[in-house]
Each structure stands twice: as C-alpha cells, then as structure tokens.
Amino acid sequence: MAEHTVCKAEELPDGGMKLVEVDGIEIGVFNCDGELLAIEDRCSHDDGPLAEGDFDPAACTVECPRHGSIFDLRSGRPRTLPAYVPVETFEVSVEDGEIKLQVD
Ligand code: FES
C-alpha cells in the first residue's frame, strides 16, 4: 500500500472532483459534502470515463457518461444497469491539510 498526495484539502471543496493518475491508474477523488471518496476512473461495463460523469454530492453517486449506470461512490457498486460489477474504491484521508490516497 502506497500513499500519494492528491492536493491541498482546500483545493477540493464540497461537490468537487479531482482526477489523478497513480501508477498508470486514473482515479477520481470526490468530495461528497465533506466526505472524501475515490474510485477508479474506468466503468466496469465498457471502460467509460466514470469519474467524469454527472456527480451528485448529496446522493454520493456518479453517473457513467457512456451508458448511464449510476455508481455508489462509497461502495463502488453500480445502482443501475447496464453495469453490474463494482469498480475499485480507494481509501482517502487528510493529513496536515493534504488529501492522501492509498493505492496498492
Ligand atoms: S461504459 Fe459505463 S455504463 Fe457503459
């Protein structure tokens, strides 16, 4: 498990999303009304750019821009078809005012 710095905490306000690349994996880091969550930016259905879809901070979900599956950002599980396989999630924390991502 390796820790990567995403950005300063104030650079990712409530309702914000930041895309980062760690070891060749694109990861979307989301601020769901204060709760920081991260998922792989690759839809389990057909590799759509998941983190770039419509983000609903109140529901803590993102909608795949390719075919519209809605994913729960906490679990990585799709709530609607056509995707049915969860995407990978990553642990996020704040240390010394910086957002950190844990990636295997
Ligand atoms: S690629 Fe995401 S729903 Fe099809």
Image (cartoon, rainbow, N blue to C red):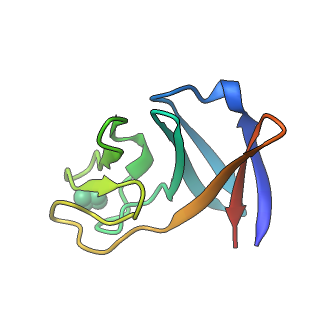
From this view, report whether residue 13 is shown above or below residue 54: above
| Name of the residue lying farthest toward the right | 96
> Going by the image, does 31 lie left or right of 11?
left
- Give the image location of residue 22, x and y in percent: 70, 57
Residue at 70% over, 73% down: 104
Image quadrant, ligand 1 = bottom left
Tell me how many marks there are: 0
Whether residue 26 is situated above or below residue 13 in the rendered picture: below
> Residue 27, image x and y in percent?
57, 53
Choose top left, top right, bottom left or bottom right for residue 25. bottom right
Residue 41 sits above or below residue 15 on the image = below
Percent x, y of residue 82: 16, 65
Which residue is depicted at the point 40% across and 54% down? 73
Which residue is at the front of the view, 41 or 55? 55
Q: Check the image and report above or below for 10 versus 38.
A: above
What percent of the width, then of the height, locates residue 83?
A: 23, 67
List the single residue furthest toward the left: 81
Q: Nearer the viewer, residue 20 or 5?
A: 5
Q: Residue at x 49, y 57 (%)?
A: 39
In the image, taking residue 24 as reference, residue 66 lies left or right, namely left
Residue 53: name its quadrant. top left
> Where, quadrant-wise, is the N terminus in this rendering?
bottom right
